[in-house]
Image (cartoon, rainbow, N blue to C red):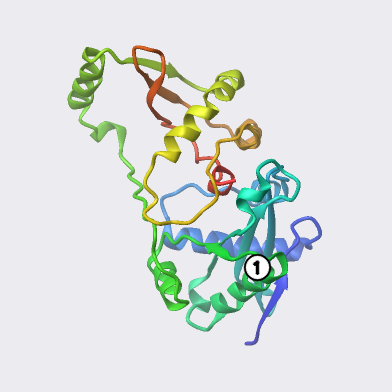
């Protein structure tokens, strides 16, 4: 069956197209992350329709008959926002193709839309990421070079080595460091004060040659995220390790739900 690429405007798309989009979204999620919770269709629609004050999105779907074979989204710094010039060259893109439609050029057709958008907006650097083997194979197929790799570790609380963790905690205290904990919703004024600290910490992370705009933590990222938490529940726990002079030596976020969108973190 012929594949047709079409723009996907989340505000004007029909209920039929939304249903097809969500069916494919759930199929891909069940394939690769069968044990992970999945947002329901209504919440996903609200999330996609929300306006990010710092980032603008464009989306396309690959239609196969009345079904959606795959989709792609592209993101770039919204014109007129602070530090816009630092991100002028960059475009971010991500998406997926369901198993039954892979190896038929669907991903290449979708990526072509991002390529045309880059020309229209005069962007010269495209950043994509992959979390699955088909995704890695596709990125290699189109000639992209891996420049940065991250590792995500999941652990069951009951299986953690709590005595060793306590030793580490006590060891930090012995060096004059102190722990500061926020359980549940972290107050907004606390987050505002910590944004420069988070920015400094992430700027210190090695990127291995990945070319990107300056990564700044911005409160809009958390405002959007907290709005979602109000609807779906969840918590945002924060643990800080402070030096004797009160500066932050490190931080951790054992959150009770998913992280804020990565694209917002890179805005």
The answer to whether one can see residue 63 in this image is: yes
Looking at the image, how many numbered discs can be counted on the residues?
1
Q: Quadrant of residue 170?
A: top left
Q: Quadrant of the N terminus?
A: bottom right
The residue located at (55%, 59%) in the rendering is 26
Q: Would you place residue 57 above or below residue 99 in this image?
A: above
Q: Nearer the viewer, residue 82 or 49?
A: 82
- Identify the element where label 1 is drawn: helix
Q: Would you place residue 195 above or below residue 150 in this image?
A: above
Residue 152 in picture, x, y percent from top left: 36, 47
Q: Nearer the viewer, residue 17 or 105?
A: 105
User: Which residue bears the numbered disc 1?
Assistant: 118
Q: Would you place residue 36 above or below residue 224 in this image?
A: below
Residue 154 in picture, x, y percent from top left: 33, 43
The answer to whether one can see residue 235 in this image is: no
The residue located at (52%, 24%) in the rendering is 194
Q: Would you place residue 127 above or below residue 163 in this image?
A: below
Q: Quadrant of residue 155?
A: top left
The residue located at (61%, 49%) in the rendering is 86
Q: Nearer the viewer, residue 15 or 174?
A: 174
Residue at the bottom extreme, as displayed: 1
For disc 1, the neighbor class at 10 Å (few under 14, some 14 to 19, many from 20) is some
Residue 34 in picture, x, y percent from top left: 42, 55
């Amino acid at each position: 069956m012929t594949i047709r690429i079409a723009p996907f405007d989340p505000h004007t798309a029909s209920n039929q197209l939304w249903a097809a989009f969500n069916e494919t979204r759930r199929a891909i999620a069940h394939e690769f992350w069968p044990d992970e919770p999945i947002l329901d269709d209504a919440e996903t629609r609200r999330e996609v329709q929300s306006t990010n004050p710092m980032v603008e999105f464009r989306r396309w779907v690959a239609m196969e008959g009345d079904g959606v074979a795959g989709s792609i989204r592209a993101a770039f710094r919204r014109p007129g926002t602070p530090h816009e010039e630092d991100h002028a060259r960059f475009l971010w893109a991500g998406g997926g193709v369901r198993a039954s439609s892979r190896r038929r050029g669907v991903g290449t057709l979708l990526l072509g839309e991002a390529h045309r958008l880059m020309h229209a907006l005069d962007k010269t650097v495209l950043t994509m990421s992959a979390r699955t083997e088909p995704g890695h194979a596709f990125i290699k197929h189109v000639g992209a070079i891996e420049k940065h790799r991250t590792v995500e570790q999941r652990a069951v609380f009951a299986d953690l080595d709590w005595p060793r963790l306590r030793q580490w905690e006590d060891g930090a205290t012995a060096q004059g460091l102190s722990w500061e904990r926020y359980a549940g919703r972290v107050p907004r004024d606390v987050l505002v004060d910590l944004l420069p600290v988070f920015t400094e910490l992430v700027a210190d992370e090695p990127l291995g040659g990945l070319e990107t705009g300056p990564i700044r933590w911005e409160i809009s990222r958390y405002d959007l995220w907290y709005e979602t938490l109000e609807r779906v529940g969840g918590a945002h726990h924060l643990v800080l390790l402070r030096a004797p002079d009160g500066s932050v030596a490190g931080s951790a976020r054992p959150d009770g739900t998913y992280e804020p969108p990565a694209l917002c973190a890179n805005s």
